[in-house]
């Protein structure tokens, strides 16, 4: 098998089609949790570390997406908390369970109806597993996006021994292979990761299901317009005002 652009496109297309078909039931279940969250006045809290942060960006604060959303990151204790910049220099930050508590404490005005969507390809690092555990202890619904092929082949890095998928109410398999990369190299190993693409697709599929259901019920979905079209800022601000003090919008 070659490792050029055409090979990646072929593999990516086949993987995304497989994920789209195999995860339809999970997408519907996840969308139902998001819809209930919105109906009850909640906010969708999205968290991902490493490249899984791209998934959180697909959920929170983007054109065509739902307004009542927040993106949570490993940087939060520095950007909106009081931690110094050296906090981010810790190479084991993602593996430290205490990181989860620092991030959760900084979420603005957590509401009982809030739903958490957590993405992690391995689903095994301490911060992600602890965050999922904390979310469930607080009584929130949890949607996990992970690679089932990868997570079932690695040990948990959390003291409790669990992984992300074991704690979630809904689990979406992003279809990525062990190690994420999909094009084998002649000397061993592989290139070109795919989990960001399939996770983004799953995020948009859930959003589409939520919006379709609201429209079918005669409701106007709270959806962002692009800030780069006339009237976008005004439209978006009017919707954000409904959730004053509960949304975090950072550059």
Image (cartoon, rainbow, N blue to C red):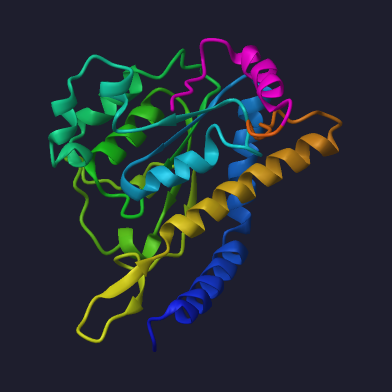
**Whether residue 51 is visible:** yes
The front one of 41 and 224 is 224
Quadrant occupied by the C terminus: top left
Q: Position of residue 116 (x, y in %)?
A: 47, 33
Q: Is residue 3 above or below residue 137?
A: below
The front one of 157 and 136 is 157
Q: Position of residue 22 (x, y in %)?
A: 58, 65
Q: Which stretch appears magenta?
A: 230-251
Q: Residue shown at 28%/81% (left/top)?
A: 185
Could you tell whether 79 is left or right of 30 in the image?
Answer: left
Q: Residue shown at 65%/35% (left/top)?
A: 226
Quadrant occupied by the N terminus: bottom left
Q: Is residue 195 above or below residue 52?
A: below
Q: Is residue 227 magenta?
A: no
The front one of 129 and 177 is 177
**Whether residue 119 is visible:** no
Q: Is residue 149 above or below residue 238?
A: below
**Residue 155 image-quadrant placement:** bottom left
């Amino acid at each position: 098998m070659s490792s050029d652009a055409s090979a990646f496109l072929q593999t990516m297309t086949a993987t995304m089609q497989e994920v789209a078909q195999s995860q339809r039931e999970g997408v519907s279940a996840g969308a139902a949790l998001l819809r209930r969250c919105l109906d009850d006045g909640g906010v969708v809290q999205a968290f991902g570390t490493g490249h899984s942060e791209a998934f959180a960006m697909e959920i929170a604060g983007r054109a065509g997406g739902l307004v009542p959303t927040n993106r949570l990151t490993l940087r939060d204790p520095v950007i909106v908390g009081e931690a110094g910049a050296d906090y981010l220099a810790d190479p084991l930050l993602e593996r430290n369970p205490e990181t989860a508590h620092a991030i959760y404490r900084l979420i603005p005005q957590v509401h009982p109806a809030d739903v958490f969507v957590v993405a992690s390809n391995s689903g095994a690092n301490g911060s992600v597993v602890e965050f999922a555990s904390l979310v469930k202890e607080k009584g929130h619904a949890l949607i996990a996006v992970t690679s089932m092929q990868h997570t079932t082949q690695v040990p948990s890095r959390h003291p409790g021994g669990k992984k992300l998928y074991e704690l979630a109410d809904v689990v979406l398999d992003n279809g990525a292979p062990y190690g994420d990369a999909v094009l084998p190299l002649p000397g061993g190993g592989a290139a070109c990761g795919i989990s960001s693409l399939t996770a983004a697709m799953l995020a948009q599929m859930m959003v589409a299901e939520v919006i379709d259901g609201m429209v079918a019920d005669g409701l106007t979905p709270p959806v962002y317009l692009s800030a780069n079209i006339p009237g976008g800022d005004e439209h978006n601000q009017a919707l954000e005002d409904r959730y004053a003090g509960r949304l975090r919008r950072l550059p």
